[in-house]
Amino acid sequence: MRGLGLSEALAVVIMVGVVLALAVVFIIVSGINMASASASVSLSQAETTLVNIAQDLNAAVMSGVPYYSLSYPLPTTQFGVYNVVRDYCDLIVVNTTHAVVWSVTSDAVVFGIPPNYLTMPSGFRKVLFSNDSLIFNGTSSSFFGVSQLGARSLNSVSYGTYVVLYPRVGVVSAYVFVPVIVVRFNPALPNLLVANVTAPSMVLIKSPLYLKYACGTNQPPPFPLSSYSKIEIVEIEVIIEYG
């Protein structure tokens, strides 16, 4: 800086420092935006995968075939992770004496994005497949649903947003169809998900009053069954293995 006075040299040094600091900020912001965009792409891929699985599982359950096996490659990504939520759904059946006469829990499959990559408000809910109702009484509805939800901690894992695949209950006449997802880790299936739909089992319930079914934050009011003198519960276990 020959020929510059002390004040001029100091001004140049400060200017260079400001430019470098702004460059660092720009690089950080660009990196965050790029990671967020990549996380959104990963989320879209997971949405497509879980919706395809839900559609195929519904077709398998509706087919009435005793055993049905399906397999899916899981897209790999560094911006999100496939995971399992144990006992995500809980179903009870209460009779006219107000006793719980039958109950079952179901797992769910999730794909979550960490909060530092992508975050949606905690009350956010977007239905991606089927509808927001957990219980249906029309044969044209799906036995499985897929939804995107906002920020939440599941099994001690924090997500900024996540997509979840869960079962729905069908009440058709005096029959209550209950798909139950049981998820197991299998190290022999890296980046692969295998779903096995097993043969249904039947349970007869006399003098039913209502059933209550909740999945995660979706907890609708009880569904009345008092118009039936008895109901037949048709439980269909879906065993999902992933690696």
Image: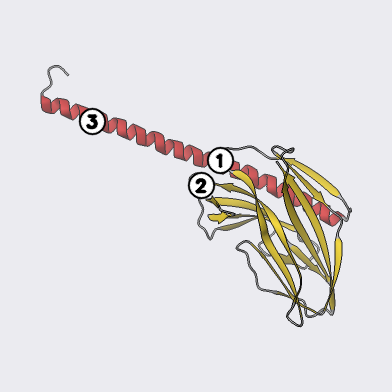
Does residue 53 appear left or right of residue 150 in this picture? right
Does residue 4 appear left or right of residue 238 in this picture? left
Q: CA distance from mark 1 to mark 2?
A: 9 Å
Does residue 176 appear left or right of residue 8 in this picture? right
**Quarter that holds the C terminus:** top right
| Furthest residue toward right | 65
Q: Amino acid at mark 2?
A: Leu
The quadrant in which residue 2 appears is top left
Residue sitting at x 62%, y 61%: 216
Residue placed under numbered mark 1 in the picture: 79
* Figure check: 172 above or below 184: below
Q: CA distance from mark 3 to mark 2?
A: 35 Å
Residue sitting at x 50%, y 42%: 36
Q: Amino acid at mark 1?
A: Phe
| Furthest residue toward left | 5
The quadrant in which residue 179 appears is bottom right
Closer to the camera, 43 or 158? Answer: 158
Residue placed under numbered mark 3 in the picture: 15
Residue placed under numbered mark 2 in the picture: 118
Q: Looking at the rendered structure, which numbered label has been put on residue 186?
A: none
Whole-percent x, y for residue 60 in the image: 83, 52
Q: Amino acid at mark 3?
A: Met
Q: Earlier in the sequence, mark 3 or mark 2?
A: 3
